């Protein structure tokens, strides 16, 4: 998830139950691009036992070749090509989800990447750009280039995040790719039980979880507990309070002015607040906060004290009319 799944957030997730696989934020690839030191830190300083895949986004073959060669010098589990980002500023440059309009270009890119990667080459994609007309052709390209893992978001690029997820495409991909390329299902997987049921229903290798892990960083622990026949851990508002305070702390930098830091924190709180079923009161107050003290007072008021601290969090997100624009990419459980 761009601007989210960096090293600091990885640490917080790991403390609460890490996923089986991590994918970095995407390294932007263009003529003047260099490997981002901040993103690289999530590889070189990985605080977990889980492998990390380096995600790239771009379309120029020479630049991709250069970037892949540089990444192979680091302890990565593989290189992941982003063909799923639905942001207009991204797909209008024919990268991310924009690549899905051109299967021939995808083949050229994956062929070049495969020639330089002895290990894992993985792909994140959606079912298509405006429709699914290229879906099978792209699956053929994936097979031809011996892609090792496909993460499939079950919406089109133009469908964004607010159209209904079409999970039957997971089943189509699993059947089409067979044992040659395992599939991770992605898109609107809100709870641990959703993840398990989806994987079992469509026989996917696992699931990729993004937004739900911001709201509920215990979700990977919960999946394992359910699989082991245990009652899953149900966090309470006091647990969420601790998480929010830690998150603010790890995101803070001396160079970030306080009001900008509060604004950055709100990117996460827009999702975290969906764990609090209070008709959006927490979210409304949080969005009006402009200083750290105001924000922390809201945390105290809604997440601590005798009234709220022990109240369990609902595992399904609060449903609001206003949609939140999500970040890209996520973490996986297999």
Image (cartoon, rainbow, N blue to C red):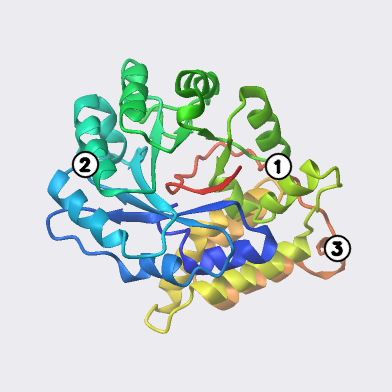
Q: Nearer the viewer, mark 1 or mark 2?
A: 2
Query: In the drawing, does residue 221 fall left or right of residue 126?
Result: right
x then y, percent, for residue 68:
26, 54
Is 127 placed left or right of 72 in the picture? Answer: right
Quarter placement of the C terminus: top right
48 is higher (above) or lower (below) than 320:
below
Nearer the N terminus, badge 2 or badge 3?
2
80 sits left or right of 273 in the view: left
Whole-angstrom CA distance, mark 1 to mark 2, is 37 Å
Q: Residues within 10 Å of mark 1 (few under 14, many from 20)?
A: many
C-beta proximity under 8 Å, tags 1 and 2: no
Circles 3 and 1: CB atoms closer than 8 Å:
no
| Location of residue 264 (image quadrant) | bottom left
Dot 2 surroundings within 10 Å: few (below 14), some, or many (20 or more)?
A: some
Residue carrying label 3: 307
Q: CA distance from mark 2 to mark 3?
A: 59 Å
Residue 100 is situated, as x and y percent measured from the top left of the image, at: 29, 29
Residue 112: give its label.
2
Kindly identify which numbered label has been placed on residue 51.
none
Q: Position of residue 145 (x, y in %)?
A: 31, 32
Mark 3 vs mark 1, foreground winner is 1
Instruction: Report whether residue 220 is seen.
Output: yes
Q: Secondary structure at mark 1?
A: helix
Q: Secondary structure at mark 3?
A: helix
Q: Residue furthest top?
A: 133
Residue that carries the numbered disc 1 in the rendered image: 192
Residue at 34% across, 22% down: 140
Report the Cα–Cα distance between label 3 and label 1.
Answer: 27 Å
* Mark 2 or 3: the one toward you: 2
Picture residue at 40% right of the left edge, 25% below the top: 127
Of pointers 1 and 2, the one earlier in the residue sequence: 2
């Amino acid at each position: 998830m761009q601007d989210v799944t960096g090293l600091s957030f990885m640490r917080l997730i790991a403390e609460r139950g890490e996923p089986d696989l991590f994918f970095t934020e995407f390294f932007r690839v263009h003529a003047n691009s260099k490997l981002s030191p901040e993103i690289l830190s999530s590889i070189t300083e990985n605080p977990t036992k889980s492998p990390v895949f380096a995600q790239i986004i771009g379309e120029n073959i020479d630049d991709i070749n250069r970037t892949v060669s540089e990444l192979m010098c680091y302890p990565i589990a593989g290189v992941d090509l982003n063909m799923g980002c639905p942001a207009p500023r991204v797909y209008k440059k024919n990268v991310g989800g924009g690549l899905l309009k051109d299967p021939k270009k995808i083949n050229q890119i994956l062929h070049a990447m495969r020639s330089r990667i002895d290990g894992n080459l993985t792909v994140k994609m959606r079912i298509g750009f405006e429709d699914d007309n290229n879906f099978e052709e792209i699956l053929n390209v994936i097979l031809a280039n011996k892609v090792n893992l496909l993460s499939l978001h079950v919406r089109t690029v133009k469908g964004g995040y607010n159209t209904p997820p079409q999970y039957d495409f997971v089943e189509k991909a699993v059947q089409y790719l067979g044992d040659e390329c395992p599939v991770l299902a992605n898109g609107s997987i809100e709870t641990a039980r959703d993840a398990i049921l989806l994987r079992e229903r469509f026989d996917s290798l696992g699931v990729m979880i993004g937004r739900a892990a911001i709201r509920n960083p215990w979700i990977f622990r919960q999946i394992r507990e359910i699989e082991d026949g245990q009652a899953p851990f149900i966090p309470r508002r006091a647990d969420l309070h601790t998480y929010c305070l830690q998150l603010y702390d790890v995101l803070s930098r001396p160079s970030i002015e306080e009001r900008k830091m509060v604004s950055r924190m709100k990117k996460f709180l827009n999702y975290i607040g969906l764990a609090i079923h209070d008709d959006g009161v927490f979210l409304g107050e949080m969005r009006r906060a402009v200083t750290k003290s105001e924000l922390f007072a809201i945390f105290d008021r809604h997440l601590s004290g005798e009234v709220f601290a022990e109240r369990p969090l609902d595992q399904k997100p609060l449903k609001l009319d206003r949609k939140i624009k999500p970040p890209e990419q996520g973490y996986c459980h297999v």
